[in-house]
């Protein structure tokens, strides 16, 4: 049965989908949002996280959101959600809940650099974006205002060419003790002929009360969730969208799009959890905001939007590597967000013709990514047979000095890094083929990882910190920054959507989210996702107005 | 001072310095009052809260702590304004409770645990100038609404800052002080702290204070007024959602406690805490607080002292806020007061405060903290059930500061 027509049907309620729904509805349009997951009860999520027996150092996998989530990479059965087709598994995940992955993100919101939009023109690598930094800059301002970004104007205006036309909505999050420790070590020093500066990382985390949400209280559990809502998550714009009469249908998994001969999307087919049959809705405009892997899966299953052959291809992440150190004096981690500052000098330069750019993050979470302090406790009790005051003193002394310097490294788009949906492959709980991933990292990126770790080691030397164990020279982790699978471009033969994020193949279909990124840069993608979504909302409004 | 302010007159530099001293007292007193309420909030499920209630109460505590931290920024900013007009940082204030006639606001400034009446007082202090809409607190009980909406001789604290701003704007020559005599973001951990060097920076400083909370010119949700109002609304919601009489977010902390045996230093309407354990903890709190005030006064005032020493002392004082003052303040609200069924609380008492001398400042200050460290260590031994907190405070009193320069 075909439902009543909406002006806009949005698939997915993460930051991109929620912003589009909110903005379009603010102009009086009738909007429906279909979301695979459910509303998160923050208190219940806190309770679930608190009760999780293993916090896994970085996040309790799926524990906080299991009750609210559609099946996905965080909570799939033992066999896993992804079908991994390469030796090295793709590990980055996302949340399928109302509000999406911003529930569990760290909250960092740096902008891309002007050079990130012109990687091919400048360095002969990758491709260029179909827009410039200057064109997107006003939308960055809007996105920072909508999300509530805290940052330091003096530190950031003009860094690596990224001018700012407006100040940050809030002053910066205060630097951690570790930030100052590293900053002091780098003062009056050069590494590789460069002066490195520790800058506070712009964050969608309240440094003061903002948008009726409290200031950060230093709970330090940003990943997987903020118990007080000081860190932005898209439930903010879900709420605002609801206040503008946007209809949300939860636990509604979109299974297919239907198009007519002209290419117009005429129906969105979805199935509610537990329902035996699919339902359909129609929208004058359909906006896909499902996150990079799901959007590719949906288009491939629907056999739509892929005249270019690029749907699912160019899968990117920001491979990360961390070097852990022990400071000579306490740096008191876990007082505040898991990271509050970074080093930006390696995000651009002539070297990008030969190896990737990278960005350093100074951790404020000890060695938690390797399991500390639980691993420290285990070692002290099991290996060293400590107990009582000696055990307390060992943990206090060691944990208080733990440092982390991580790098996030750009990747080039590679058509062979891709999402597919093999028809004969394993199925998820809705009976849909699970996404199969092929993901490899080339020397452009691995050379950068190696260089980053060399520099990190020299930073530790400058700080006179010890490095008990060097990182695996072949290892890297995912950043949760899944990008590229429906990339934007001016050439319909080489891209899926145009500069307005409208499908080249379907005039009433838009795609928002990091899947549209042609290249990765080194910035956490969410702010750029938000800026693009707001820009696309204006295009959608214009399209509805003229149609 | 009250006379000057109530007459709306600042005619001379001395008048201006007096008005700023009054502002310092208010910022300082408000910070202590807010901290006391936050200290009294429960933290653990074992205190009779459901998980949902615990999350709400912890959020309220974090919000009030944040507002208190901004009051401390305002105090530091008022010190800079004072220094700019030829004054010196003013750290003194009368011990609690203060008469409602102490300031033209005619609102009592006191230490009381968190509840609707306390929040109503806080809202009243922070009420926006001119544009307050009484309908915005229509959710509250009638007596609370009346308390919030009551008129006073002066509308708001903002009126005091208006007088100060008008005086400086009308006579820029009042800006005479050394810019060296002021705190900056390198000296103290306040990213928004403004050095006052001219009329423009003075206006920026005063605007910062007003925008964040006192005497807002618009009713903005994110200022102190809006924060306290939202907390009050949530308090009513959580109370209504719970079975009648079951939701008690705060411990029964005694009003206006005192640990001063000497009546000369104890305000007549304060309540002497007699429980021996609380008395030890309460006196330790007061001594740490006094040491902290002396240290901050030194750091902000002693412009001829070397910068490194000033920074080191300031860093140590600021670190003590979270590592000693906060845990002791919260601990006190859990201890019996010895007066009925009430628990104790932090008195923020100031006795005779002796300034730290230039010359051997670090040695003197470090020695003072070391003596308090010994006191805290002894308390840890004497009161084994409270050992973790006293040991934590003891360690904090010996921790080396993190100094940037």
Image (cartoon, coloured by chain):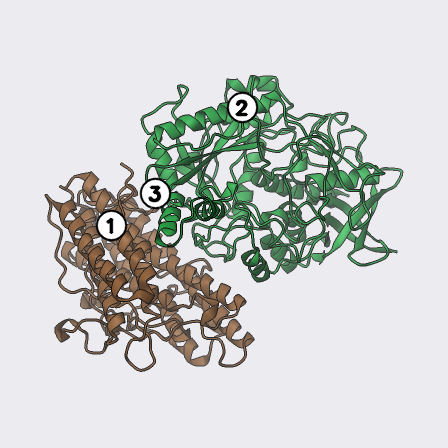
Chain in brown?
Answer: B
Circle 3: element type: loop
Chain ID of residue with mark 1? B
Could you tell me how far apart the alpha carbons at marks 1 and 3 are, in whole angstroms?
A: 13 Å
Q: Are marks 1 and 3 on the same chain?
A: no
Residue A538 position in % (x across, y down): 65, 42
Could you tell me how far apart the alpha carbons at marks 2 and 3 are, in whole angstroms?
A: 30 Å
Task: Determine which residue is flagged by label 3.
Answer: A330
Which of labels 2 and 3 is toward the front?
Answer: 3
Of residues B314 and A211, the one drawn nearer to the viewer in this rendering: B314
Whether residue A125 is situated above or below residue A439 in the rendered picture: above
Chain in green?
Answer: A
First in sequence, mark 2 or 3: give its number.
Answer: 3
Whether residue B247 is situated above or below residue B387 in the rendered picture: below
Task: Determine which residue is flagged by label 2.
Answer: A448
Q: Return the mark for residue B398.
A: 1
Q: Are marks 1 and 2 on the same chain?
A: no
Could you tell me how far apart the alpha carbons at marks 1 and 2 are, in whole angstroms?
A: 43 Å
Q: Could you classify mark 1 by the number of other residues whose Cα lies within 10 Å: few (under 14), some (14-19), or many (20 or more)?
A: some
Q: Residue at x 33, y 78 (%)?
A: B342
């Amino acid at each position: 049965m075909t439902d009543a027509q909406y002006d806009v049907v949005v698939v997915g309620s993460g930051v991109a989908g929620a912003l589009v729904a909110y903005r379009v509805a603010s102009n009086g349009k009738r909007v429906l949002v279909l979301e695979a997951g459910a509303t998160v009860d923050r208190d219940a999520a806190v309770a679930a996280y608190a009760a999780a027996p293993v916090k896994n150092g970085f996040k309790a996998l799926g524990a906080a959101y299991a009750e609210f989530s559609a099946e996905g990479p965080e909570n799939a059965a033992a066999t896993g959600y992804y079908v991994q087709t390469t030796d090295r598994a793709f590990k980055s995940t996302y949340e399928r809940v109302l509000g999406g992955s911003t529930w569990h993100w760290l909250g960092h919101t740096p902008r891309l650099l002007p050079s990130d939009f012109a990687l091919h023109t400048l360095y002969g690598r990758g491709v260029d974006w179909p827009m410039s930094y200057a064109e997107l800059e006003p939308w960055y301002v809007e996105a920072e205002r909508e999300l509530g970004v805290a940052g330091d104007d003096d530190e950031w205006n003009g860094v690596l060419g990224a001018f700012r036309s407006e100040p940050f909505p809030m002053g910066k999050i205060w630097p951690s003790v570790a930030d100052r420790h590293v900053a002091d070590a780098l003062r009056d020093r050069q590494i590789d002929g460069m002066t490195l500066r520790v800058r506070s990382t712009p964050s969608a985390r309240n440094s003061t009360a903002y948008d009726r949400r409290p200031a950060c209280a230093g709970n330090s559990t940003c990943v997987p969730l903020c118990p007080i809502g000081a860190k932005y998550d898209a439930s903010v714009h879900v709420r605002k969208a609801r206040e503008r009469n946007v209809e949300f249908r939860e636990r509604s998994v979109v299974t297919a799009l239907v198009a007519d001969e002209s290419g117009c999307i005429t129906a969105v087919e979805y199935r509610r959890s537990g329902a035996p049959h699919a339902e359909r809705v129609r929208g004058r405009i359909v906006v896909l905001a499902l996150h990079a892997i799901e959007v590719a899966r949906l288009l491939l299953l629907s056999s739509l939007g892929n005249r270019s052959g690029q749907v699912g291809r160019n899968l990117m992440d920001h491979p990360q590597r961390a070097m852990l150190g022990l400071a000579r004096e306490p740096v008191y981690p876990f007082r505040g967000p898991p990271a509050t500052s970074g080093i930006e000098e390696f995000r651009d330069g002539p070297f990008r013709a030969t190896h990737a750019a990278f960005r350093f993050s100074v951790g404020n979470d000890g060695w938690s990514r390797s399991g500390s302090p639980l691993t420290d406790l285990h070692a002290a009790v099991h290996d060293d047979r400590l107990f009582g005051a000696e055990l307390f003193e060992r943990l206090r002394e060691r944990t208080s000095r733990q440092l982390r310097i991580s790098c996030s490294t750009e990747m080039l788009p590679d058509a062979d890094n891709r999402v597919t949906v093999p028809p004969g492959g394993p199925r998820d709980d809705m009976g849909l083929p699970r996404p199969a991933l092929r993901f490899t990292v080339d020397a452009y990126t691995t050379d950068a990882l190696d260089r980053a770790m060399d520099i990190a080691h020299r930073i530790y030397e400058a700080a006179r910190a010890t490095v008990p164990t060097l990182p695996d020279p072949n290892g890297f982790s995912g950043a949760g920054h899944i990008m590229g699978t429906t990339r934007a471009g001016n050439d319909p033969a080489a891209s899926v959507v145009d500069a307005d994020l409208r499908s080249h193949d379907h005039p009433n279909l838009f795609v928002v989210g990091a899947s549209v990124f042609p290249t990765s840069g080194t910035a956490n993608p969410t702010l750029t996702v938000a800026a693009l979504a707001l820009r696309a909302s204006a295009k959608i409004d214009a399209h509805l107005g003229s149609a | 001072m009250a006379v000057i302010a109530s007459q709306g007159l600042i005619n001379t530099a001395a008048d201006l310095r007096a008005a700023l001293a009054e502002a310092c007292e208010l910022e300082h007193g408000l910070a202590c009052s807010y901290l006391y309420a936050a200290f009294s909030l429960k933290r653990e499920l074992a205190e009779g809260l459901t998980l949902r209630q615990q999350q709400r109460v912890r959020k309220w505590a974090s919000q009030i702590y944040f507002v208190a931290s901004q009051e401390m920024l305002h105090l530091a900013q008022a010190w800079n304004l004072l220094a700019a007009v030829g004054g010196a940082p003013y750290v003194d204030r009368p011990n609690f409770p203060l008469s409602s006639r102490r300031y033209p606001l005619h609102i009592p400034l006191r230490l009381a645990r968190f509840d609707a009446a306390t929040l109503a007082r806080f809202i009243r202090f922070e009420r926006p100038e001119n544009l307050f809409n009484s309908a915005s607190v229509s959710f509250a009980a009638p007596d609370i609404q009346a308390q919030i909406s009551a008129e006073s001789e002066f509308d708001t604290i903002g009126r005091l800052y208006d007088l100060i701003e008008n005086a400086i704007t009308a006579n820029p020559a009042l800006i005479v002080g050394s810019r060296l005599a002021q705190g900056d973001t390198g000296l103290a951990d306040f990213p928004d702290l403004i050095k006052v060097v001219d009329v423009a920076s003075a206006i920026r400083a005063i605007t910062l204070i007003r925008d964040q909370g006192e005497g807002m010119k618009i009713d903005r949700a994110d200022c102190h007024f809006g924060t306290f109002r939202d907390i009050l609304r949530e308090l009513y919601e959580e109370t209504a959602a719970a079975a009648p009489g079951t939701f008690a977010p705060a411990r029964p902390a005694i009003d206006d406690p005192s640990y001063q045996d000497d009546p000369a230093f104890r305000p007549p309407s304060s309540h002497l805490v007699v429980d021996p354990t609380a008395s030890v903890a309460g006196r330790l709190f007061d001594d740490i607080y006094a040491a902290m005030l002396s240290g901050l006064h030194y750091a902000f005032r002693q412009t001829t002292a070397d910068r490194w020493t000033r920074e080191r002392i300031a860093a140590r004082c600021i670190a003590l806020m979270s590592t000693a003052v906060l845990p002791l303040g919260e601990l006190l609200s859990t201890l019996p007061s010895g007066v009925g069924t009430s628990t104790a609380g932090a008195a923020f008492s100031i006795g005779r405060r002796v300034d730290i001398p230039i010359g051997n400042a670090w040695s003197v200050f470090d020695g003072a903290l070391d003596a308090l460290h010994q006191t805290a260590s002894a308390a840890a031994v004497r009161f084994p059930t409270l050992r973790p907190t006293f040991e934590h405070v003891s360690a904090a009193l010996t921790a080396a500061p993190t100094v940037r320069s």
